[in-house]
Amino acid sequence: MARFIRRMAIAYIFLLFLASADIGFFRGVASFGINYGQIGDNLPQPEKVVELLSSLRITRARIYDTNPQILTAFANSGIELIVTVENEILNQLDDPQQALQWVSSHIKPYLPNTKITGIQVGNEVFTDDDTALIHYLVPAVVNIHNAIGQLGINQNIQISTPSSLAVLDQSYPPSAGSFKSEISGIMYQFLNFLSSAKSPFWINAYPYFAYKDDPTGISLDYVLFNPNQGMVDANTKLHYDNMLYAQVDAVAFAIAKMGFNGIEVRVSETGWPSKGDPDEVGATVQNASTYNRNLLRRQMANEGTPLRPRMRLEVYLFALFNEDSKPGPTSEKNYGLFQPDETMTYNVGLSALASSTSTSSASISLTSSATRTKASPREYRSPVHWMFAYLLSSILLMRRTP
Ligand SMILES: *[C@@H]1O[C@H](CO)[C@@H](O)[C@H](O)[C@H]1NC(C)=O
């Protein structure tokens, strides 16, 4: 009898393990990232933001600085955080001692409770109006990389920088992707770093900008991920049914042309404004909702781009909140999935995930509806999934043994 109870207890523990791992599995499927910008005078406190992200089961976020209040609030939340070195201080970090000092005071104190997984050195430095800035980039990147190594905190932190699509000279068709010649010298050094550090290349890619500039020449369905005939790259014969993937692959081709293979391209920002000025064509709530909803479905299906179909495209949406203090046209203030009061700007389907007690079924329905719209559905099974299937069968067998 005691043995039976012990067996039941073991089986019970395994089942608990299985249940929690299963939630983790689906959480993994849905784990896109989100950009948490703070250029607003009415945004919720960081503690509230952590609650919001947790309730939405969003496990990755990026901030545009190293705000101590945010780094503290994210402690023990399990949310992976990418932080940013502000462009304004890049020039100080070409001194290795200063870089070490910066990492010691801005990063190290928050580890490991706050899961800092990346440091973005500057933002869109290659195309900044201040053309002197670009010369500080590679020294700062290298010095910060060395500093985290020296401090022994380099295991889970990747160093990179996000670039705007304006780094490309050519982006269409994707195979013609190439970097602008005026930045190619420093780009080569930067790619050399990424290649040896095994860090990804991050791109801020907004199909919205391309559409806004040429609404009669570009198909709205193509930029919104709606069903459409797409385009075929005549050089590679690859078929593209949306502009975001074409932009990402153009970057991958540009990198390959510089002689580097195997650098992963990730999307540090993409999004669609829900409101704009009269001349900002396409900036409506419905279009923003369609863009983000369609993109999230593809994220949940773990899609890669046509060039790298098996490598899940990592995407960080822009942005979590509407930011009322952003300069520029009306659209700039209206990229948020949420209003500052934490109400949804529009429903992208996240609420179904969040409010449902049965996370897995909500994820499954989103995943399968995404697969249906795809030309060639690909089954996704994590190895972890099979491992637990195996464990479950062992438990059943164990219980039958006399
Ligand atoms: C999306 O943008 C286009 C172009 O401005 C506009 O004609 C259309 O009405 C918008 N669609 C929706 C559903 O808002």
Image (cartoon, rainbow, N blue to C red):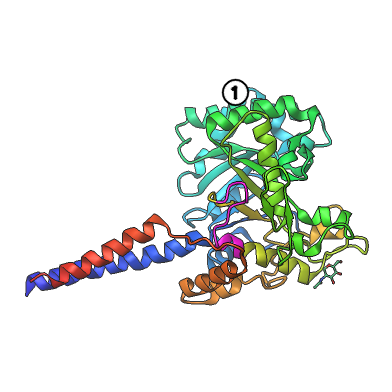
Residue at horizontal 56 percent and vertical 34 percent from the top: 103
In reply to whether residue 338 is colored magenta, the answer given is no
- Residue 390, located in which quarter of the rendered image? bottom left
Q: Is residue 239 visible?
A: yes
Residue 129, position as x, y percentages in the image: 84, 36
Q: How many numbered markers are drawn?
A: 1
Residue 373, position as x, y percentages in the image: 62, 68
- Residue 101, located in which quarter of the rendered image? top right
In reply to whether residue 301 is colored magenta, the answer given is yes
Quarter, ligand 1 = bottom right
- Most foreground residue, 175 or 40: 175
- Most foreground residue, 377 or 6: 377
Residue at horizontal 62 percent and vertical 72 percent from the top: 349
- Residue 133, located in which quarter of the rendered image? top right
Residue at horizontal 47 percent and vertical 77 percent from the top: 357
Label 1 beta carbon less than 8 Å to ligand 1: no
Residue at horizontal 73 percent and vertical 24 percent from the top: 185
Q: Which residues are magenta?
A: 297-309
Compared across the picture, whether 355 is left or right of 35 comes to left
- Which residue position is annotated with label 1? 96
Q: Is residue 38 visible?
A: no
Residue 250, position as x, y percentages in the image: 71, 43
Residue 360, position as x, y percentages in the image: 46, 71
At mark 1, the secondary structure is helix
Question: Type of residue at label 1?
Answer: Pro
* Secondary structure mostly taken by the magenta-highlighted segment of the chain: loop
Near mark 1 (Cα within 10 A), the count class, few <14, some 14-19 or many ≥20, is: some
